[in-house]
Image (tube, rainbow, N blue to C red):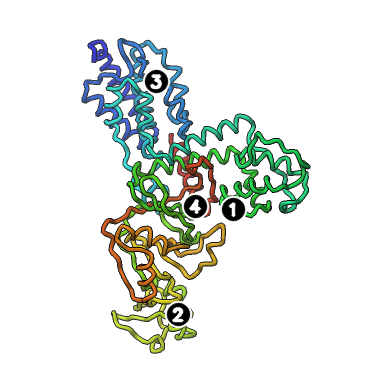
Amino acid sequence: APVEDRSQGMPIRDALGAAMAGAKSEAQRNRLSEIEANYVAVGHAPIWISNGTVSANARQMVDALGLAFEDGLDPADYGAARLAEQLNAADPAALAALEIELSLAAVAFGQHMNAGRVNPRDVNRELVKFPKVVATDTILSNLRQTKQVKAYMRLLAPHTARYERLRQALSGYRRIERQGGFSVVAEGDTLKPGASDPRMPAIRKRMQDAGTLPSDVVFAGDLNTYDQSLAEAVKRFQELHGLEAVGTIGKQTIAAMNVPVSRRIFEMELNLERNRWLQNDFGPYHIFANLADQVVKVVRNDDTVHAEVIQVGQPYHRTPEFSDVMEYVEFNPYWGVPPSIAVNEYLPKLRSNPGVLAAQNISVFSGGKKVSAGSVNWSQYGKGKFPFTLRQEPGKGNALGRVKFMFPNEFNVYMHDTPAKAKFDASSRYFSHGCLRLKDPLTMAQVLLEQEGWDRAKIDAVVAGGKNTVVKLKTPIPVHIVYLTAFVNKDGTVNFREDVYGRDKILADALAKLRAKG
């Protein structure tokens, strides 16, 4: 740095001390301590001041902070407006204070863009995500070397199409908000195609707002008639909101239509935060399950090669969010009944009817040896005193169906078949004890095992044989289980899902608490 820049050393050192003394939180104090280490290493040479005045890089950074809303962040959290007012500072002490304030804002913004504002594990123990935060020294060292400050800050955000699509959609929804928001549809009787109702023009306008009905089409019929083209648009709207896509407009559909655009923007902001927790690269070949959407996809080189609906954990058996690696596929599996289910669900039945297990092909083991359910006095056992394990044998009616897909983890969560096929017809499929139940598991097996030399005929033959068969994957497959209540598909359609697990609220509360700390 030029000699005149180094003359700022003493004021910068003083400004750092003042900032540390006035830190509003432990996180800010820690960040300032890391910033101080970077400045000490370079003799307190400034980043944002050159020749006794504010540099062009400083102005670029303030511009970048002012655009934080594009990524669902709040420019006010980084003091963007206040920093913009200080750009004409000339007094050495004021320049030094601006130097430290701007570095603090840049680091906070960069780290938030890179890995989120809050640590997911601090928000909710059901979120087993470990985003790696870019180091303070890395950010500041790179900012000392670049002339493209805005471009560098953008590089810190996730480099995924998923993130970018949602970011672009957020911009579109902000535009809708500036133009007055969505059309409001009055509540009333349930409407079926062919009905006549004065709410039709408002519904037609709302579908145009949602992008499911072309806005340039001139409607020539009776404006109050629920015609077929509008019914198709309503079905698409229902699909995009996780509702049963039947075209009938009832209370749920009207409620979804009347969610204010401000609320949708907030949901997008929360889900941009979730995207920042995720890895940039899920791997060229991986499995991706969105619990809020209740869909699992197999992705190869950015193309979805298989997708199917799933059943996920009930609200009181919530499926956690985590990443792991699928190691093997098991046909005609045994089901080891989890201890909680054995005690809470089977024990009460055993007390009144020891034969209940045989009817479900479940064996009882004690000390590794099979025992007769009828020989046990079940009334003397309960929570904390249950020295038995229950195992359902392979076959028809097995709770895991004909195949399970194992990615061993601390939660004992995996993907499997299920005899409860009728439940897949529901639009909201929160039915399991935490595992992911597949609608079409044999096709999933075919897709995953084709690289192992298995075809559908071989799979069908093994299943028909009824023998427990484990197929170890030569190349384990990464599995990512997430919870995204707002997302944008490749075709540009913006999707929203109900927050059944209440995780939007938990995250919103955590972010509000963080903001309150300053």
Residue type for callout 2? Gln
Q: Tell me the tag on residue 292.
A: 4
Disc 2 to disc 4, how far (Cα)?
32 Å
Q: Nearer the viewer, mark 3 or mark 1?
A: 1
| Label 1, label 4: how far apart the Cα atoms are | 12 Å
From the viewer's perspective, is 432 left or right of 43?
A: right
Q: Badge 4 local density, few (<14 within 10 Å), some, or many (20+)?
A: many
Which residue bears the numbered disc 3?
A: 60
**Tag nearer the camera, 1 or 4:** 1
Q: Earlier in the sequence, mark 2 or mark 1?
A: 1
Report if residue 151 is visible in the image: yes
Which is more toward the observer, 512 or 198? 198
Q: Say left or right for 400 vs 146.
A: right
Up the image or down, 494 lies above or below 332; here it is above
> Is tag 3's residue or tag 1's residue first in the polypeptide sequence?
3
Which residue, given by chain and number where applicable, does mark 1 sit on? Answer: 243
Q: CA distance from mark 3 to mark 1?
A: 44 Å
Are the residues flagged by discs 4 and 3 in contact, CB closer than 8 Å? no
Tell me if mark 2 has few (under 14), some (14-19) or many (20+) residues whose alpha carbon lies within 10 angstroms of its own. Answer: some
**Image position of 280 with respect to 477: above or below:** above
